[in-house]
Image (cartoon, rainbow, N blue to C red):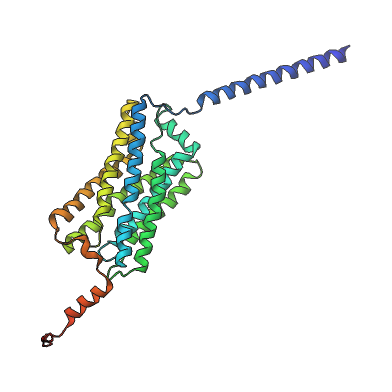
Amino acid sequence: MVGDRQCKQSALGIWKFIKQRNCSFDSTVTEFRDSKPKMANWNSVPLEVTYEVLGWFAFVSWSISFYPQVILNFRRKRVVGLNFDFVLLNLTKHSSYLIYNASLYFSPTIQNQYFHKYGYDQMIPVAANDVAFSIHAVLLTAITLFQIAIYDRGSQKVSKVSIGVVSVAWLTAAVCFFIALPNHSWLWLLTIFNSIQVFMTIIKYIPQAIMNFLRKSTDGFSIGNILLDFSGGIANYLQMVVQSVDQDSWVNFYGNIGKVLLSLVSVFFDIIFICQHYVLYPRKKSSELVASPKQDDETREQLVRPSDQSPPENV
C-alpha cells in the first residue's frame, strides 16, 4: 500500500512538472510569435504605385547611364579623357552599396535588428529596384574598368591616392567585420558599408571635375551618363519622400542616410558637369571624339611635318 501510494505521488509530481513545462513552453512560443517583426503596410494605393514607378524609373535611368560611357570607349577604342580614379572609386562605392542593399533586403536577421532599432511599424528603406541597380552598377563599372585595361590610355593612370583610399576603405570593412562577428552586430556592420559608399559618392566625382577644369574640356567623358544620372537621382529622392508621406514618418531618411546622400551628392555634381559641358567648355562636341585611328594618324602626320616641306603644287 505504501509503495502504491508513493508511486502515485511520484506519477502525480511528474505530471505536474510536465504540465508546468508545457505551460512555460506555450508562453514562450506565444511571446516569440507576438514579438516577430511585422512590416508596415502602405496606407495609400496611389502613393504605393507612385513609389514603385519612381523607384523603377530611377533604376532604369541609373542603369542606362552606364552605357553611354561604355559605348563611347568602345567606338573610340580609347579611354583618354575618362578619369580612372573616378572609375576605381565608383567600383568601390557600388560594391559597398550592393552589400548594404542586398543584406538589408534579403536577411531576416538584419531586418529584425533594423525593426528593433527603428520600430516594428517602420518599412525597410531598401526596395527591389535598389538591389537590382546595385548589381547592374557593379557589373557595368567592372566592364568600364576592363576597357581602361585594354584600350589606349595615353599617359593617364590611376593615382596612388585613389589606390590608397580604396585600400583603406576595404581594410576598414574587414576589421569591422571581425568586430561585428562575436555579437552578430550585422546592422552596425551595414552602417559601415553604407558610410563607405557615402564617402566614395562624395569624393568620386572630384577627380573628373578637376580633370575637366584643367583640360578646359569634357572630351572623353560622356554627358549622356550625367543627364541620366541626374534624372535617376531626382527620382530616387522623390521615392523616399513618397514613402515618408504615406507613413507619416521621416525615419527612412535617417534610417537610410546613404540613399539620401547618394541622391543629393549625385545631383550636385551632375549640375557641375552639365555646366562644364554646356556652359564653360561648349566648343568640344562629343561627335569629335569618334574620329577613326586613320584620322588620328593623319592629324599626327600634319603636326610632325617639317616646316620646310611645302605641299605639292598643282600641275
**Image location (x, y in percent) of residue 161:** 30, 61
- Left or right, residue 143 beside residue 276: right
Which quadrant holds the N terminus?
top right
Residue 298 or 266: which is nearer the viewer? Answer: 298
Q: Position of residue 289 (x, y in %)?
A: 23, 65
Residue 231 to residue 7: above or below: below
Location of residue 10 (image quadrant): top right
Q: What residue do we see at 41% from left, 44% from top?
A: 131
Identify the residue shown where x is 51% and y is 43%: 182
Is residue 148 positioned above or below 54 on the image?
A: below
Q: Residue at x 29, y 40 (%)?
A: 235
Q: Quadrant of the C terminus?
A: bottom left
Q: Residue furthest right?
A: 1
Q: Compared with residue 124, is residue 90 higher up or lower down, i.e. above or below?
A: below
Q: Position of residue 104 (x, y in %)?
A: 44, 40
The answer, for residue 250, to whether it is visible in the render is no
